[in-house]
Amino acid sequence: MAYQCQRECYQQQFSTTVVSCIPTEQKLEVNGRKETVKGFHVVFKDTILFPEGGGQPDDRGVVNDIPVLRVTRQGADALHFVTSPLPEGCEAHMKVDWERRFDHMQQHSGQHLITAIADLEFGYKTTSWELGRQRSVIELDTPGLKPEQMEFLERTVNEKIRASVPVNVKEVSVDDPLVEQVRSRGLPDDHAGPVRIIEIEGVDSNMCCGTHVSNLSHLQAIKILGVEKGKKNKSNLIFIAGNRILQYTDQCFSVEKALTSLLKTGPEKHVEAVDKIQKSVKMLQKSNLNLLRDLAVLTAQAFKSDPKRGKLFTLHRKEGDNEFMNIIANEIGTEETLIFLTVGDEKATGLFLLAGPVEMVDSLGPRVSEMLEGKGAGKNGRYQGRANRMSRRSEVTTLLQESLELHSQQEE
């Protein structure tokens, strides 16, 4: 059937009656995680809340001040998921989340327009599309679009918007000859009731169940953000329409202001300034790496020249990497010395290296990794990995000292 939301897409409030209310549960996103929520599926005599379909997400709203958390379609019925029951036969007053609805209308009609022009001008068919939370994607049956094609496409769709082209909705029976003449990817298996045809006057006719603007001028504008390589030799065209362009512009301007403040230069020189910073950072990183290598060698030499040195060498540095630790181990030598090195946060995460006589490292390596709540692997007298609890370094040192003492006693 055609719902009131499809007949009057701009209607924001509506009164109807409850047909059924059945206990159920639904998986919903709660604080960024999927959770099973218990509630009720309510069917109304009619609805202004659109159930998801045609690539368009469902509406949100309230019924008798009860939030509607999902709207899905089952055959001819629109199932409204709520967490409080509504008695059968009672009157229900609906309010749609208009900001969400109008945004969906703008993006969906924008997709129809882009799809039609891409087909008319280039012969590129739309094979699927997704109305995303921030931007939408149209999958086109072509391996790529040239920059001049994207420019032409964006210019042409915005010309149609400025021309205030009407958008009409027709409802026809399934056996109407018009159904065979319009663009379509076919009807769903559980389709019921009349077929809706969305006509952009002089541009396109297409079967669609979604909600749309009544005039292209209501789209305000369309911005094509780019094209990415898609699956199976297809291309994904990314776009935003209407109010999303204003939001996108606000975000870009905020970033521009922040960069101007940080870089101490105008927007026209931001790229040049960032390029200079990146080159400076690379030079500093290279210099820092060389200094770390020199420090590793000096650290090892200082230990080797100490007449009072023992058979255990331990060291922790906040700055460093695996290469830093391996240079120290190579310089000291691992035949007679047990080496325990760590780099990173003193109490949280970091890297570790245990090096020394093969038998001792093979035995102690997994225990060290376990104590540091990390993961590691080893061979040929070296065991290294990532640690999640560096605060236990002193406990590891105690373990290694006790193991060396026991090993000396066994040799005697």
Image (cartoon, helix red, strand yellow):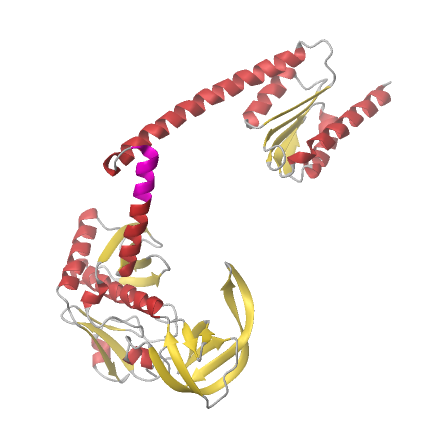
Residue 190 seen in render: no
Report the front residue among 28 and 369: 28
Quadrant where the C terminus sits is: top right
| Apparent side of residue 266 relative to residue 336 in the rendered image (left or right) | left
Q: Where is residue 153 in the image (x, y as percent from the top left)?
A: 19, 56
Query: Which residue is found at the position 54% from the left and 76% from the top?
Result: 39
Above or below, 181 against 132 in this view is below
Q: Where is residue 178 in the image (x, y as percent from the top left)?
A: 21, 80
Q: Give the range drawn in magenta.
A: 255-264
Above or below, 258 against 62 in this view is above
Main SS, magenta residues:
helix
| Apparent side of residue 34 relative to residue 100 in the rendered image (left or right) | right
Quadrant where the N terminus sits is: bottom left
| Apparent side of residue 127 relative to residue 344 in the rendered image (left or right) | left
Report the front residue among 118 and 160: 160
Q: In which quarter of the image is residue 410?
A: top right
Residue 201 seen in render: yes
Q: Does the magenta stretch include residue 262?
A: yes
Above or below, 85 against 408 in this view is below
Query: Which residue is found at the position 26% from the left and 38% from the top?
Result: 267
